[in-house]
Amino acid sequence: MSLTEKIAHDLTEAMKARNKVALEAIRAAKTAFLLARSEKGADSALTPEEELKIIQKLVKQRRESAAIYKEKNRADLYENEIAEAEILEKYLPAKMSSEDLKAVIKGIIERVGAKSSADLGKVMGTAMKELAGKADGKEISAMVKDLLK
């Protein structure tokens, strides 16, 4: 079952359960999928990587909005955004541990032949492709910078 199909199924379940927060989060994902598909063409389908990128983007948007709401002392809106982000995160693969991430990035650095921080761009490009959905971009960037010192 593709992520698009799982979202459609979960949308129906959220409607039956009358879960308003889940319903809003899943509807946002379904809408984002439909928009992405319509940009590509009439009968095109999204790849699993594209689906993951869309979900990651939605989670990131909700986390950023929640931070702004917290800053402005809007606890009601903050809690709603966090709840939606947590619902959407269930569709993402499990995050890598720091040790696993470090091992993968070390392997990428060796493969690319990076020697100093001047090679940061080459390493980051490869790392972001390989680790899409498995680790946060900020975490990857910090780890790469630390290892290339």
Image (spheres, rainbow, N blue to C red):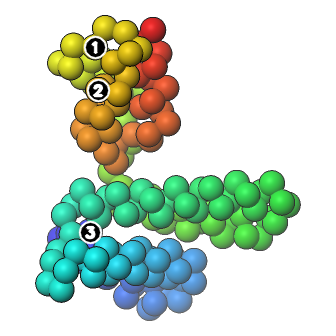
Which residue is at 47% across, 15% downward?
146
Mark 2 / mark 3, whichever is N-terminal? 3
Q: Is residue 89 above or below residue 30?
A: above
Q: Amino acid at mark 2?
A: Lys
Contact, mark 3 vs mark 1 (Cβ under 8 Å): no
Which residue is at 60% across, 56% downward?
63
Q: Amino acid at mark 1?
A: Ala
Quadrant for the N terminus in the image: bottom left
* In-image side of 38 versus 96 (left or right): left
Contact, mark 2 vs mark 1 (Cβ under 8 Å): yes
Q: CA distance from mark 2 to mark 3?
A: 30 Å
Q: CA distance from mark 3 to mark 1?
A: 36 Å
Q: Amino acid at mark 3?
A: Leu
Residue beneath label 3, please? Answer: 3
Quadrant for the C terminus in the image: top left
* In-image side of 78 versus 72 (left or right): left
Mark 2 / mark 1, whichever is N-terminal? 1
**Residue 114: mark in rendering:** 1
Residue beneath label 2, please? Answer: 122
Residue 137 lies in quadrant:
top left
